[in-house]
Amino acid sequence: MQVKKYIPGISLSLLLAMIASLIANISYIKHLGLSSIVIAIILGLLIGNSVYPKLSHYCYVGVDFSKGKILRLAIILFGIKLTFQDIALVGYQGILIDILMVVSTFLLTMWMGIKLFHLDQDSVILIGSGCSICGAAAVIATESTINTNPEKVTIAVAIVVIFGTLAMFIYPFFYAYIATHFAISDSYFGIYIGSTIHEVAQVVAAGNAISEPAVETAVISKMLRVLLLAPFLFVLSAYLIKNQQGNSQKRKLVIPWFAIGFLLMACLNSLNILPKQFVSIIIMLDNILLTMAMAALGLTSHYSAFQKAGIKPLLLGFFIFVWLIIGGAAINVAVNAAL
């Protein structure tokens, strides 16, 4: 492997990741709940649709490496943010709520996206994974399984950012209204937040606007949804393999080996044998790698893809957003009433 040809693209992705991280640490940006990976894809889009075409001849190899191999490594390391002990704190009700939300949201997205809006399957799968599991991280992990166009990934991430950001502001007002009419604990509402809002950063922002108990249970509930990413990828891979039979243009699916690594990292962290400082370093490294991958993704996405996609993906995202708020509330109430 000629290392030199990878350096320009990797360096550009790293530079954008560093800039995105600096922007994400600005207090106002933190308040908005915009993570570095979201900012990175925005920067990537800006550069990718302006000066990058002039640099792509020198950078494309390293950029492709960043959104491919580096991305898969980042997904594996992402598992170290989870422990099974934390997940147990939400109880079996919280676990059941999260499973029901992931399954119902993804299936509803598939049905609406394909049957009502007539979108292509890859786009609907990406939007569904982002809305039902863990936002941008789920979108890019799913892309690594189905191997689709980067423009579709960018559109799915944009939908997650738009409606997840709206949720950050809507949920605290929703809580204020509910709390004045019903007896509801902050921790109970925190599970609702974690089981229905798109991004981890958005969950933290919404929970912080309510109380410390709310944000604690919200994050734990959200982390359980993140853990469901691995089994989701295996089920998705099996589904796509089954449904490509008899198709003259069979797609080659990547077995999500990185999902196994993701689970192994979560298991390892659950054993409590790793020094906290080491875990912190791995988390920091993972954030950098994920941000690099998103920057690279933005660099290879073109504005024309948004024009071509039209308003249908946005409408799909809106209806799923409404489902997450109303349907998510119904599932939370029903499960807690039944158990």
Image (cartoon, grey):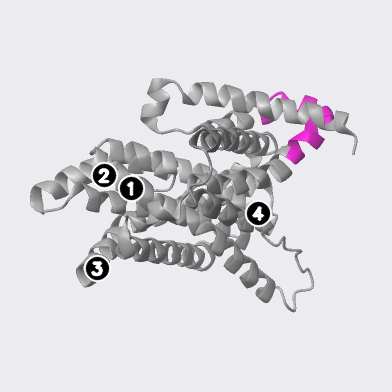
Q: Residue at x 9, y 47 (%)?
A: 180
Looking at marks 4 and 2 on the same chain, the residue that comes earlier in the sequence is marked by: 2
Query: In the rendered view, does 323 fall on the left or right side of 230?
Result: left
- The answer for how far apart the CA atoms under marks 4 and 3 are is 35 Å
Asked if residue 308 is among those painted magenta in the image, a careful observer would answer: no
Q: What amino acid is found at the position of numbered circle 2 in the picture?
A: Ala
Secondary structure state at the residue bearing disc 3: helix
Spatial CA span between label 3 and label 2: 20 Å
Q: Is residue 308 visible?
A: no
Under tag 2, what secondary structure?
Answer: helix
The first of marks 4 and 1 along the sequence is: 1
Pointer 3 or 1: first along the chain: 1
Crowd class of label 4 (few under 14; some 14 to 19; many from 20; radius 10 Å)? many
At horizontal 61% and vertical 65% (from top left) the residue drawn is 234
**Nearer mark to the viewer, of 4 and 3:** 4
**Quadrant of image for the N terminus:** top right
Instruction: For the residues labelled 4 and 3, say whether their Cβ atoms are less than 8 Å apart.
Output: no
In the rendered structure, are the residues bearing label 3 and label 2 in contact, judged by CB atoms less than 8 Å apart?
no
Q: Position of residue 217 (x, y in %)?
A: 31, 48
Location of mark 4 (residue): 258
The residue wearing badge 3 is: 334
Give the position of the C terminus as an image quadrant: bottom left
Q: Which mark is residue 214?
A: 2
